[in-house]
Image (cartoon, rainbow, N blue to C red):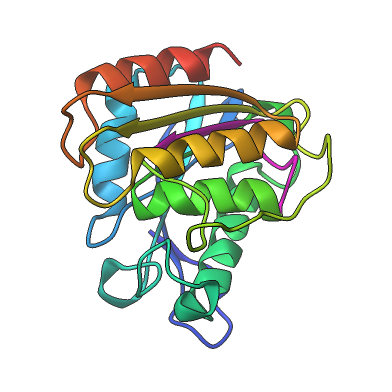
Amino acid sequence: MTAGHHGPFRPVRFLEAGRPQGAAKLGGVLIHGRYRTPQEMIYLASRMAVDNIRWIAPSAGHDRTWYPGLFMDPLQANEPFLTHAIKSLDHAVDRAGEAGRIDPKHMVMVGFSQGACLTAEYALRHPGRCSTMVILTGGLFGPPGTVWAGTAGMLAGTRVLLTGSNVDEWIPESRVYETAAALEGFGADVTVRIYAGRAHEVSDAELVEAGEFIQGM
């Protein structure tokens, strides 16, 4: 585990898994949920059974939490933590891309819950850096009625798998669909999967679908 740039915050820690540096065709970033761990994301990634990939899993510093509030709170309620979290993801993308050896077309980001919301937000703030985004139960930030800023076509060439549940108490099904519509409006190719009755977790079916989606790169 190594430390990365951190500014005024605690150093970001990274775990690595999969192929060694210099040997993988794909680069991947794994973002854990609130109170969860990079180790858990690496375990989930192993169950996706993606070949020829090197995974980088950053760790949220304080209390294993990327931002303090809920993702549908006003944006300022989660600052400056949200901006710092996005910077941490950007450092992880740099590391996974191995200084440009792996290009954006071969980069994937996978997040769950808080990590999924950050994955969606990263797509808007850094369009084109990862061509494949797997958003496991998450959505874009902002209160109801938020209109997300962006330009038409800025996510052209970006593939997104976006999952959710019709009974999830943290991520409303309606926000999953709003997120899909926003990302599609900016040019992304979005696949939405709503799992009926699924608790706030990553199901076996999602892991299978996510693995196949990533292999489709």
**Image location of residue 93, percent across then percent down:** 61, 49
Identify which residue is drawn at 46% across, 24% down.
192
With respect to residue 61, does 145 lie above or below? Answer: above
| Residue at x 49% of width, y 54% of height | 118
10 vs 117: above or below? below
Instruction: Using the rendered view, name the quadrant where residue 96 is placed.
Output: top right
Q: Which residues are magenta?
A: 126-136
Is 140 a magenta residue?
no
Question: Residue 33 vs residue 93: left or right?
Answer: left
Toward which corner of the image does residue 36 lie, by quadrant?
Answer: bottom left
- The part of the image, by quadrant, that contains residue 25 is top right
Q: Residue at x 28, y 67 (%)?
A: 64
Question: Which residue shows up at 58% across the image and 71% down it?
Answer: 83
Q: Position of residue 140 (x, y in %)?
A: 52, 51
x, y percentage for residue 32?
34, 51
Quadrant for the N terminus in the image: bottom left
